[in-house]
């Protein structure tokens, strides 16, 4: 393994569990364990899976004045989401955008009372932290919470596991966030997830991480889950992977993420615009975008992978779109994918053809998610 790769605080836990380690976003990360990707996927859908997401960036944004609303308003200059209205103990999905309306990263923002917790993607965290330091320096202190770990416990039995170990989590609902003590360790826990299942994210100091991970793995409902199953789970749930399904050339409207821009930030809202690329994004709200992220279901058993071109007919010469992510969906029992097509071909039920190793395979535009979400509302 390349000696320049970083390791999370859970590296030894992964090795002890028999993980196959691979490079991912500059880290050595577990691709799968002995049971294999298919079994890990199904275990998460039926019981509870433990994921190491410590490679992601955890950032504390503190207002210099002590007034968290100042920090929230400042962060709104970088994202189109309504940050000001996030109540203490709640979190919200957001997007960093550029002047052309493109997405620099997607992220989660939690209000922890008198400060904001921002969780960003691993491959983007250096640029994201620099962006926040430059944009918020006058009003906020931006601190990378380096050395911390982040665990994700996901699945229909995640709630009963956490209730057993930390009873105060039982009343948490989807997108709640709070600080608690878990087996003597102070952690920040949120209730959301990247699988479509009920679940929790647990931010914890690195020196406590392996112990807490082992405690969770000792629970009869829990097994370790790697990157392979994480990808198939999130795709069945219709959730984007930054760098594959979203990037700097994709606007939120093209990405079908209008729901991430609250009415207060849209045209006519109380805090309309004021974020990078607002003119372009708000214009697309009004007039539509030239292309659209859609779900795709393929015939047969072979998955249609990212990069495959999409055509309007079996013998069409001009591609009308591209697949960005594709897997065989174990829960669906069929190949599922997402990608971008021109808006004229984006309606559910539209039949398209994907280029699969030199032959055209029939695919149908489908509603997402492919598997219904089961968050605890």
Image (cartoon, grey):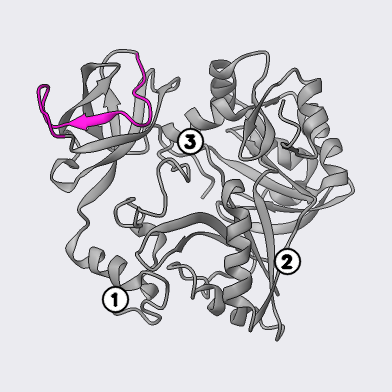
Q: Which residue is mark 2?
A: 143
Identity of the residue drawn at 65% across and 57% down:
177
Of marks 3 and 2, which one's residue comes earlier in the chain?
Answer: 2
- For this view, does 239 lie left or right of residue 300? right
Q: Which residue is mark 1?
A: 267
Q: CA distance from mark 3 to mark 2?
A: 29 Å
Q: Which residue is mark 3?
A: 234
Q: CA distance from mark 3 to mark 1?
A: 31 Å
| Frontmost residue, 56 versus 162 | 56
The answer to whether residue 248 is seen in the rendering is yes
Dominant secondary-structure state across the stretch colored magenta: loop
Contact check, label 3 and label 2, Cβ < 8 Å = no
Identify the magenta region: 302-318
The x and y percentages for residue 350 are 15, 34
The x and y percentages for residue 113 are 69, 71
Disc 2: CA contacts within 10 A as few (<14), some (14-19) or many (>=20): some
| Frontmost residue, 290 versus 63 | 290
- SS class of the residue under badge 2? strand
Identity of the residue drawn at 28% across and 13% down:
300
Identity of the residue drawn at 38% across and 75% down:
264
The x and y percentages for residue 91 are 57, 60
Of marks 3 and 1, which one's residue comes earlier in the chain?
Answer: 3
């Amino acid at each position: 393994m390349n000696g320049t790769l970083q390791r999370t605080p859970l590296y030894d836990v992964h090795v002890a569990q028999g993980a196959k380690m691979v490079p991912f976003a500059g880290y050595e990360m577990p691709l799968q364990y002995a049971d294999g990707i298919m079994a890990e996927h199904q275990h998460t859908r039926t019981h509870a899976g433990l994921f190491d997401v410590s490679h992601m960036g955890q950032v504390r944004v503190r207002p210099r004045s002590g007034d968290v609303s100042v920090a929230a308003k400042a962060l709104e200059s970088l994202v189109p989401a309504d940050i000001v209205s996030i109540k203490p103990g709640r979190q919200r999905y957001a997007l960093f955008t550029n002047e052309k309306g493109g997405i620099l990263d997607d992220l989660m923002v939690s209000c922890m009372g008198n400060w904001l917790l921002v969780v960003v993607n691993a491959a983007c965290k250096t640029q994201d932290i620099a962006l926040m330091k430059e944009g918020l320096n006058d009003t906020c202190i931006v601190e990378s919470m380096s050395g911390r770990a982040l665990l994700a416990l996901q699945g229909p039995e995640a709630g009963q596991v956490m209730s057993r170990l930390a009873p105060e989590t039982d009343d948490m609902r989807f997108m709640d966030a709070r600080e608690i003590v878990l087996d003597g360790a102070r952690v920040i826990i949120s209730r959301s997830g990247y699988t479509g299942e009920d679940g929790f994210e647990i931010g914890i100091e690195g020196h406590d991480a392996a112990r807490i991970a082992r405690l969770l793995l000792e629970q009869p409902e829990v097994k370790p889950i790697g990157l392979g199953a994480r990808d198939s789970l999130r795709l069945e749930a219709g959730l984007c992977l930054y760098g594959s399904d979203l990037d700097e050339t994709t606007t939120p409207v093209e990405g079908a993420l209008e729901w991430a821009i609250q009415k207060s930030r849209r045209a006519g809202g109380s805090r309309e615009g004021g974020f990078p690329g607002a003119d372009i994004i708000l214009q697309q709200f009004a007039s539509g975008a030239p292309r659209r992220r859609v779900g795709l279901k393929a015939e047969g058993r072979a998955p249609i992978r990212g990069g495959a071109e999409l055509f309007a007919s079996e013998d069409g010469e001009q591609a009308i779109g591209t697949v960005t992510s594709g897997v065989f969906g174990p829960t669906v029992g069929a190949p599922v994918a997402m990608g971008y097509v021109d808006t004229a071909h984006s309606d559910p039920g539209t039949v398209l053809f994907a280029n699969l190793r030199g032959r055209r395979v029939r695919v149908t535009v489908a509603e997402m998610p492919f598997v219904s979400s089961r968050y605890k509302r």
